[in-house]
Amino acid sequence: MIDEIDSATMGVLRLALDAASLRHRVIAHNVANTNTDGYTPLRVSFEEQFDAVRSALGRPEPVDRGLLEGPRPVISQDAPLDGASARVELDMEIAKLAQNTVHYQALLRGVSKHLSILGIAVTEGKR
Amino acid sequence: MMDYSQAFEISASGMTVEKLRIDVTAVNIANMHSTAAADGTLFRPLRVISRSSLPVFASQFEDGAGEAVYKLRGAQIHAVQELDVPPRSVYEPGNPGADDKGFVALPGVDHVSEMVTLVVALRAYEANVAAMNAARTMAMKALEVGGNQ
């Protein structure tokens, strides 16, 4: 694959879109189980795994695509702070849902922009 | 890859559960003043027991040759349970269902808790609709990728 098309940008965007999509399903699952007794809400952890990539971004050389092999969205059960069983907080879930939707759209905008940069290269800068 | 049908299925499962909860509340309230049937059985308040359809937490399995895929299917109806509550006794000597002392046995429907269940189920239903609309918005936006810049 051409380096520009299958770049690290696209790799990160693909991963992040997967994570946002999974997060949406997890939130929908939590909302569906709002009134289920004894249900522990699920969470997705993803962004925390990007420390290595972030430090690589501080260096001048291009980001190694191998760094993107590590981070994967992971589902875990919500750990309550006080030891009691966690419950689904409907308002918090809906807030997370709205945030995730906007985040997903921002990522899609990123994909579009990246592709449009490629489009500029293809058309040699002409419109 | 965004599995839209899965997102819609999850929200739909939640809506099914909450709709049944509302239906059952309506049945309870409708039978609040029902006397015993011809065979002598008295209506008993019902309650919906739902459960998460993720029986084992780590139930993620390989989907084809690809990576591990999380299977989430939302909520499901576990049972509709009859509540074991004592009947109310109301003094109504003219009622054909009254005993020799003039008391009629009516179902022990708790009016307040039924109304609370109704409102909670209604809000939960709305939240499921919100989740489904969000999934639709995301899907529509994904279709716009590579559109006119």
Image: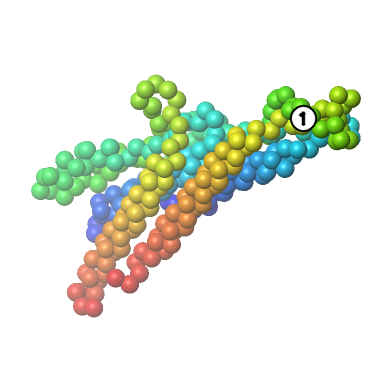
Classify residue B50 as left or right of residue A43. Answer: right
Residue designated by label 1: B90
Q: Which residue in the rendered view is the most extreme toward the left?
A: A60
Q: Quadrant of residue B149?
A: bottom left
Q: Quadrant of residue A112?
A: bottom left
Relative to B60, say whether A22 is above or below.
below
Q: Nearer the viewer, residue B53 or A117?
A: B53
Tell me what residue is drawn at x 85 percent, y 31 percent.
B93
Tell me what residue is drawn at x 31 percent, y 55 percent.
A107
Tell me what residue is drawn at x 32 percent, y 40 percent.
A46
Tell me what residue is drawn at x 64 percent, y 36 percent.
B111
Residue B70 seen in render: no
Q: Nearer the viewer, residue A15 or A80?
A: A80
- Which residue type carries mark 1? Val
Residue B148 seen in render: yes
Q: Which residue in the rendered view is the most extreme toward the top?
A: A83
Relative to B105, say whether A1 is above or below.
below
